[in-house]
Image: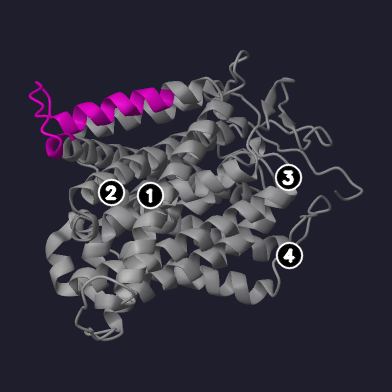
Amino acid sequence: MGTEEPPAPSGENRAGEEPSAAPVGETTDEATVTDEGVELERTIGLVGGLAIGVGTMIGAGIFVFPGLAAEEAGPAAAASYAIGGVIALLVALPASELATAMPRSGGGYYFISRSLGSLAGAIVGISLWLGLVFASSFYLVGFGSYAVELLGRAGVALSWPVPPTTALGLVFGALLTAMSFTGTENTAKLQNAVVALLLVILSVFLGYGGLDALGVFGASSTPEAFAPFGLAPVFTTAALVFTSYLGFAQVATVAGEIKKPGRNLPLAMVGSVILVTVFYVATIFVATSAFGSKTLGGFGETAMVEVAGEFFGLPGVIAILLAGLLATVSSANASIMSSSRAVYALSRDALLPKKAGAINLKYGTPHVALAMAGVPVLVLVASGQTEVLAEVASFLHLVMYGLICVALFQMRRNTPEWYDPDFRVPAYRVVAGVGALASFGLIAFMQRLSQVIGVALMVAAAAWYYYYARDVSLKGVL
């Protein structure tokens, strides 16, 4: 830290509440102390941070997109995933520096509100909260679909008064939210176990498929042109599959609960991006080697189930369906927890009512914020119409990623006394500049409907700020 204390947040919201200032010197490697003297415990280590990043990212990227991506770009879809990984890495590095300078819950919202001001912070924070709610709902509907498919393959037919996909998504959404109430340690343990099992299944599957594709064993396949449709579809497909990389920034949203944040935060964010990118590229390589891009595209969203059946028969199908279940529940679990931390951070800053950030004295978790994340998730799951909203979540995340890069420029050029990160981005002008341009540029490749809804949500967030908290000042404070 610098020699001078950072200035305190100022102003008050429409209810007369003032933003809370974290006491200087009381945020340690083991706990973050609130102004009420209640500790938000640091219980998540490096493995837990990696599990949150990997667990959130490795869902749709492997189990939904391969067939769709191969149909668009052919085997070059692997390059599309690699492009997405490079862009995610360009944003992960600035986010890591900002996170080690400001290891507090809220992630991208916190960085942007302290560097660019309250209005930008309110727009990003509210968008992050809602975006993660929609993403969680999408994952839970996907979980229900995989569960119904798995039960169907096992000969179990469900005849319930509500669609089984919806019912199973609701049950697990309620269970995950209830588990988050009891503490991040329990949630992190579940996340670690789920991600570890998922990676084992995928490693076996991709290892066998990779050896088969290289001709070590198995049937020979006809070589296919790498980019049969040209270069343009490679970039439009990169925009499509970038949804697969939303998870790395979720590590920063629980920064206030990560042990030794100066070391573990950058390692968790950068490491999870690299690890997941390797899995994505390998998946496309194996999938297009098994069937060819045209046939793979014909399988649609269940392409990976067919690939598993080609290699391992029914046991392979069951294993991939099980992995799909683990991936979707893992993504939903991480997203619900991160969404609640965005609410917690907004309420501490008086951009939302203070009651939203209340800490449960028994478990040390923000129980009201968890309810504000979990309840709307269940409502959206019950609707069963979350696909477009998941795209909107991608739009809102890309805006936040671009602004994170802009925030790094702001902090480096107008450095506050307290700004002393444990990790600094090398050649930050190039890294953050390219990261911002790439993030905003990918938005241009998205569907018009997603762009319109995303802009509307941002305008609504700005309107809330001007109505409720326009006098709150956060720029340059810690």
Q: How far, Cα to Cα, is label 4 from label 2?
A: 46 Å
Residue 455 covered by magenta stretch: no
What residue did someone put label 3 on?
477
In space, the residues marked 1 and 3 are separated at their CA atoms by 46 Å
Q: Quadrant of the C terminus?
A: top right
Q: Earlier in the sequence, mark 1 or mark 3?
A: 1
Task: Verify CB contact (< 8 Å) between mark 1 and mark 3.
Answer: no
Q: Is residue 95 above or below residue 183?
A: below
Q: Secondary structure at mark 4?
A: helix
Q: Earlier in the sequence, mark 3 or mark 2?
A: 2
Instruction: State the image quarter where residue 260 is shown.
Output: top right
**Tag 2 residue:** 320
Label pair 1/2, CB-CB below 8 angstroms:
yes
Sequence-wise, the earlier of marks 4 and 3 is 4
Task: Point out the tag, 1 or 2, that comes first from the N-terminus.
Answer: 1
The Cα–Cα distance between marks 4 and 3, rounded to whole angstroms, is 15 Å
Q: Quadrant of residue 322?
A: top left
| Residue drawn where x is 66% and y is 43% of the image | 474
Three-letter residue code for mark 3 = Val
Which one is earlier in the sequence, the residue at label 4 or at label 2? 2
